[in-house]
Image (cartoon, grey):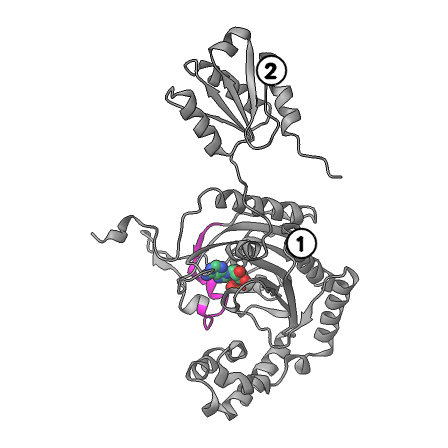
Amino acid sequence: MADSTFRAPKGTRDILWPDSARWRALVDAFADVVGAAGYTQVVPPMFEHVEVFHRLGDATDVVSKEMYEFLDKGGRNIALRPEQTASVVRAFAEHRPVVPWKVWYAGPNFRYERAQKGRFRQFDQVGVEALGPDDPHLDAEVIALAWRFYERLGLRRVTLLVNSLGNPEDRARYVEALTAHFADNRDALSEASRSTLERNPLRVLDSKRPEDADLVAAAPRMDDHLSDDAAEHFARVCGALDAVDIPYRVAPGLVRGLDYYLRTTFEFVAEALDAAQDAVGGGGRYDRLAEEMGAPPTPGVGFALGVDRTLLACDAEGVFDAPEAAVDVFVVDTCGGDEAVLLTDEVRRAGLRADRAWDGRSMKAQMKAADRSNAAVALIVGEEERAAGTVTVRDLRGDAGQQAVARGDVVEVLRSRLAPPTAT
Ligand code: AMP
């Protein structure tokens, strides 16, 4: 068997501590930010009947090239979810909750993509979906939540791009104009864009190939094809963003990868990342999707943010650091270990994080383990301490030295030593 058998498959990876702690802290921060706006969590399945995802557009790469599809043992055509909006809207159509239905999610998606830095075959997203209202202020709320979340992480170099793809009729008229423009100049297009033109004309606007640049720059603009109604909706979205001081740039060429978007679309770009993976999140309106899944006509808007890329952006900006230690306290017991059983239990029950050494090792070996744990404080119990009914509390990372503490006062002393410094 090949050496790669016992390695994570291409495009996947194991997330070990401290990255795993950071990953969870990110999801916790997200849950906090969106929870404060009344969004509740939804946990959809990781696989669905493949038809659910065909609603993303058969011509999109996500559906036509990248989907993990298989027949299950019951002969059902199943796909691992490549994103979660379709699943959440399917859940909406199935359960018909009261609107507005404002939900958030976090979890992995699967796409058979070319694996590279910031692009995986299994990757996590956090996101929200809001179904019911057609109100442009809801679009602005959703966009603002993503923005406030980035702020909460400490990211400063994120650019928000917004656009409107218009009502379905506007979008159709625009696609027609765009197709005519590119078809008239077909020979000047790159080969890749000629093939994109046939499948999905809007996506030609995404081409980064130098030979396409002039034609893309000269292409008809979406904003010239907006109906009054769609233009008014977009103006109100922008007005609400202005009102809450969220900076953005209108990007008439922003079309995004999935077919279901109508009217408002947006994307967040991390300036600190390389252009190949600088999109950290995006979303928009998908007013027809619920209806296509069998629900009464219900507008919707949402976004998905890539967890892996957002963390890469945090690395690049030097914010939202990984924790340095998994525990605060390390118990060193050279009397056989019984004291360590009691002390760790007591400290943990007091809400502090504590670990200990194992296998009855020497004082020196245990102190080395304590150092390696990066805990702030060691609790040391030797024969002397045991006889005196005390514990030695030793500072491992600062210059507070050590003190002998009565056994009954340990938790109190730890609490005061470990209290976060008050800001001045
Ligand atoms: P999408 O669902 O394609 O609109 O993507 C939303 C966000 O998810 C992107 O901006 C990326 O941050 C992230 N993302 C999408 N595909 C991948 C992938 N293959 N690997 C890592 N992150 C991804």
Disc 2: which residue: 405
Image location of residue 81, percent across then percent down: 45, 57
Identify the residue at image location x=69%, y=58%. Answer: 144
Magenta highlight on residue 286: no
Identify the residue at image location x=60%, y=15%. Answer: 405
The residue type indicated by label 1 comes to Glu
* Front residue of this view, candidates 38 and 19: 19
The response on whether ligand 1 sits within 8 Å of label 2 is no
Disc 1: which residue: 151
Asked whether residue 92 appears in the rendered view, the answer is yes
Residue 122 as seen in the image, left or right of residue 70: right
Is disc 1 surrounded by few (<14), some (14 to 19) or many (20+) residues within 10 Å? few
Report helix, strand or loop for mark 1. helix
Is disc 2 surrounded by few (<14), some (14 to 19) or many (20+) residues within 10 Å? some
State which quarter of the image contains the C terminus.
Answer: top right
What span is in magenta?
45-61
* Front residue of this view, candidates 51 and 333: 333
The residue type indicated by label 2 comes to Val
Is 418 drawn above or below residue 119 in the view shown?
above
Image location of residue 391, percent across then percent down: 55, 15
Camera-side mark, 2 or 1: 2
Which sits earlier in the primary sequence, circle 2 or circle 1?
A: 1
Query: What number of labels is visible?
Result: 2
Magenta highlight on residue 49: yes
